[in-house]
Image: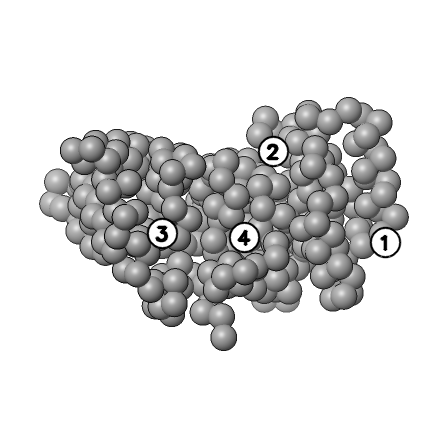
Amino acid sequence: MDKTDAVSAETKCGYVTLIGAPNAGKSTLLNQLVGAKIAIVSPKVQTTRARVTAIAIEGNAQIIFVDTPGIFNPSRKLETAMVNAAWEGANDADVLALLVDANRGVTKDVERILDGLEASGKKAHLILNKIDMIKRDKLLGLAQSLTDRGLFNEVFMISALNGDGVDYLREHLATQVPDGPWLYPEDQLAIAPMRQLAAEITREKLFLRMNQELPYSLTVETENWEERKDGSVKIDQVIYVSRANHKPMILGKGGQTIKKIGAMAREELEEAMERRVHLFLFVKVREKWLDDPERYKEMGLDFPK
């Protein structure tokens, strides 16, 4: 047995894909599983647009978690691309996990996912989330009705927000990934380039700051990344909107709204990167960006045909 074979025999490594309906809590769970802020989180549905990949070490196992967009009935190109990305992530998984908001139960979107699993012949782990928001007898009844579908290997009950049950879930998932060498350095937490993560952080702040005023059809791109001699970094980002009347909403009176968003994003970027960040935000109108394949590529999505 050579050295590579010895390492492979001693370690485990594999992809665990999280799927679920919008706002089931997948991004919150991903962050809990890896112990760091990797995926953006907001109360708005469909916050996650593309697959987000993060890495956790549990014992001798390296678990590569893939957070996917919520699966629902799409009506626009962007939504179709998001749902396609979720199912592609499910097809590529070594271990598949369906996250269900226990408080909402089996919604139309959850039923759609269950039908998709049944049609694919795939089995998954069932994770019931937000168990602190539902009475025990109702929770047990939901678990029973879902397991009766014959689609699940195991059932876990957690609260992704406060971390209840997450450690046990991660320990179990570590036993499920295949034997093999680790694919990434031990200290690496995410696979996406930092410029893409930076754009996602700004998009999250837009969601949180603008609340219901924010038009869904916007995207953020990191246009320029300049390393400076003093160790700081200058980042230029463009917020693309699809309509001219959306631009003043983001700028705010006297530019106050975008200044606040920039300050929020800069603070989190400096904490994540552990250095000074000079962040400059610009808003541009691109009326048909939702029909531009290049914008989808920037988001990590395939343009739907």
Residue 270: x, y in percent? 28, 35
Q: Residue furthest front?
A: 245
Q: CA distance from mark 3 to mark 4?
A: 16 Å
Q: Which residue is mark 3?
A: 218
Crowd class of label 2 (few under 14; some 14 to 19; many from 20; radius 10 Å): many
Q: State which tag comes first along the sequence, 2 or 3.
A: 2
Q: State which tag comes first along the sequence, 2 or 4.
A: 4
> Where 38 sits versus 83, above or below?
above
Please state which of the two labelled residues, at mark 2 or mark 3, is closer to the viewer. 3
Residue type, label 3: Leu
Q: Which residue is mark 2?
A: 160
Residue 245: x, y in percent? 27, 48
Mark 3 vs 4: CB contact within 8 A: no
Residue 144 falls left or right of residue 184: right
Residue type, label 2: Ala
Numbered label attached to residue 69: 4
SS at circle 3: strand
Q: State which tag comes first along the sequence, 3 or 1.
A: 1
Please state which of the two labelled residues, at mark 4 or mark 1, is closer to the viewer. 4
Residue 191 falls left or right of residue 25: left
Q: CA distance from mark 2 to mark 3?
A: 28 Å
Q: State which tag comes first along the sequence, 3 or 4.
A: 4
Q: Quadrant of residue 23?
A: top right
Mark 2 vs 4: CB contact within 8 A: no
SS at circle 2: loop
Q: CA distance from mark 3 to mark 1?
A: 40 Å
Q: CA distance from mark 2 to mark 4?
A: 17 Å
Q: Nearer the viewer, residue 158 or 303?
A: 303
Residue shown at 18% from the left, 40% from the top:
278
Q: CA distance from mark 4 to mark 1?
A: 24 Å
